[in-house]
């Protein structure tokens, strides 16, 4: 009799754990659907604002070269992230560099007065014209901050030369 009672209690605990796991799975699926809907809404909003990164066209890239006027690590201005203002022969240009942690992970420091070269594309939205940097070069050091499709790269620790396969891409 005691064994049957223990077995029933064990089955009740197992059933409760199963229902709890089912509830978490249902909540996760509902959140995934909401995230997909939010993502789709954000993408259509970006397209309407002219800020869709798929509009980035690598064939329209230009090269800027000049002197750093200022560097802001985490600008609240649109687009948020790292910004550098470069004095070029045609005037000052504000370039968006993406996430400043990517620069830090690559030991890339930008200081006022430094000579810098930026390859990227100017884009115009209803919030203004922005220069989206893809490559940033200072001296012989070059850091990619955006993909060829214009998406900002995520700040992961760089692979060492001994662990990378296939060389530069």
Image (cartoon, rainbow, N blue to C red):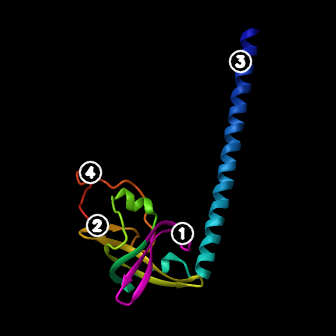
Quick one: SS at disc 1?
A: loop
Which marked residue is nearer to the observer: mark 3 or mark 1?
Answer: 1
Q: Position of residue 124 (x, y in %)?
A: 52, 85
Residue to which mark 2 is pinned: 169
| Residue shown at the point (60%, 85%) measured from the top left | 126
Report the front residue among 31 and 16.
Answer: 31
Where does label 4 land, which residue? 163
Describe the element under mark 2 as helix, strand or loop: loop
Q: Are marks 1 and 2 in contact (CB under 8 Å)?
A: no
Name the residue that disc number 1 marks: 80
Q: Nearer the viewer, mark 1 or mark 2?
A: 1
Q: From the image, which quarter does the N terminus lie in?
A: top right
**Residue 146 visible to the viewer:** yes
- Count neighbours of disc 2 (C-alpha within 10 A) and say few if under 14, some if 14 to 19, many if 20 or more: few
Q: Is residue 27 above or below residue 94?
A: above
Residue 167, numbered label? none
Give the alpha-carbon distance from disc 2 to disc 4, as whole Å.
14 Å
In which quadrant of the rendered view does residue 69 lie? Answer: bottom left
Q: Residue at x 66, y 59 (%)?
A: 33
Do the residues bearing badges 4 and 1 touch, measured as CB atoms within 8 Å?
A: no
Callout 3 crowding tier (Cα within 10 Å): few <14, some 14–19, many ≥20: few
Q: Secondary structure at mark 3?
A: helix
Residue that numbered label 3 is attached to: 7
Q: Name the image quarter holding residue 41.
A: bottom right
Q: Tell me how far mark 4 sits from mark 1, CA to CA.
A: 33 Å
* x and y percentages locating residue 164 in the rendered image: 27, 55
Determine the residue positioned at 55% across, 78% down.
51
Q: Residue at x 28, y 66 (%)?
A: 169
Q: Which residues are magenta?
A: 71-97
Q: Residue lying furthest front in this view?
A: 113
Q: Residues within 10 Å of mark 4 (few under 14, many from 20)?
A: few
């Amino acid at each position: 009799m005691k064994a049957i009672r223990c077995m029933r209690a064990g089955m009740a605990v197992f059933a409760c754990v199963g229902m709890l796991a089912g509830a978490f799975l249902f909540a996760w699926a509902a959140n995934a659907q909401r995230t997909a809907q939010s993502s789709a809404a954000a993408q259509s909003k970006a397209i309407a604002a002219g800020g869709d990164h798929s509009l980035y066209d690598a064939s329209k890239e230009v090269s800027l070269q000049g002197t750093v006027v200022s560097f802001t690590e985490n600008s609240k201005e649109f687009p948020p992230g790292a910004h550098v203002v470069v004095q070029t022969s045609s005037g000052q240009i504000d370039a968006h560099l993406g996430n400043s942690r990517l620069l830090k992970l690559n030991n890339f420091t930008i200081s006022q007065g430094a000579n810098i070269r930026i390859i990227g594309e100017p884009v115009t939205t209803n919030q203004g014209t922005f220069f989206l940097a893809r490559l940033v070069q200072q001296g012989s050091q070059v850091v990619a901050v955006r993909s060829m499709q214009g998406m900002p790269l995520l700040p992961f620790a760089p692979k060492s030369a001994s662990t990378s396969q296939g060389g530069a891409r």
